[in-house]
Image: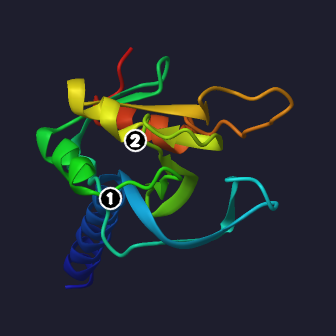
Amino acid sequence: MGRKIFTYAIIAIFSILTLGCEKVSSNGKVELYLLDSYSTIGNHSQQIDETTAKTKAKPLISYEDFISYDPDTYEFLLSDRAVKAINDEGYSVFGVAFAIKANGELVYTGYLWPSYSSATCDWAYIDPIATSFDNKMEVCLGYPGPMSGQAIPDKRNDPRIIKIFKRDHKLVK
C-alpha cells in the first residue's frame, strides 16, 4: 500500500512539473501597445521616461500578428490585420507613443511617427505610412535620422525579443 502511494505521488509531482514548464514557456510573446500616459525627459525632447510609461489594456498588435522579425534591419513583418489596426489609428505630426513588451514587461518605447511630419524626433519611431506598402514595420532611431550629439538607447534587439522570436521560428536569419 505504501509503495503504491509513493508511486502515485511521484507521478503527480512529475505531471505538475511538466505541465508547469509547458505553461511558462508557451506564454512568452512580444506585443505592441499604445501608451495611455508617459512623461518625457527634458523640455524639448521626445525621449520617453520609461519608468512613467503606462500602456493601454489591450495591444495594438498581438503576437499572432507578428509574422517575423529581422534583427539586421529591425523590421517586423506583420499580418494584414495588424497593418489595418495601424492604419485605423489617427496620427499627430508629433507621433503616437507606443511600447514594445516581451513577456508582459516593457522593453522599449517609441512613436508611430508619420513621414509627413516636419517635426523631428529624438527617440525610436515607426513610420505607420511605410508599413502600409509591404506589411513591414521598421523601427528606426531618430526622425528624420540620428541627430548629431543625440544618444538614443538602442533596445530593438533586446535578448528577450530575440529569444521569443527564435523559439517560435519567427526570427529571420
Above or below, 6 relative to 172: below
Q: Residue at x 82, y 26 (%)?
A: 148
Residue to which mark 2 is pinned: 164
Quadrant of residue 133 in the image? Answer: top left
Extreme residue toward the bottom, this view: 1
Tell me: 147 left or right of 60. right
**Front position in the image: 118 or 72:** 118
**Front position in the image: 60 or 161:** 60
Residue to which mark 1 is pinned: 27
Above or below, 21 relative to 74: below
Secondary structure beneath dot 2 equals helix
Above or below, 38 relative to 136: below
Quadrant of residue 167 in the image? Answer: top left
Q: Amino acid at mark 1?
A: Asn
Give coordinates of residue 158: x percent, y percent: 58, 39
Q: Residue at x 82, y 60 (%)?
A: 42
Tell me: 101 left or right of 142. left
**Front position in the image: 14 or 132:** 132
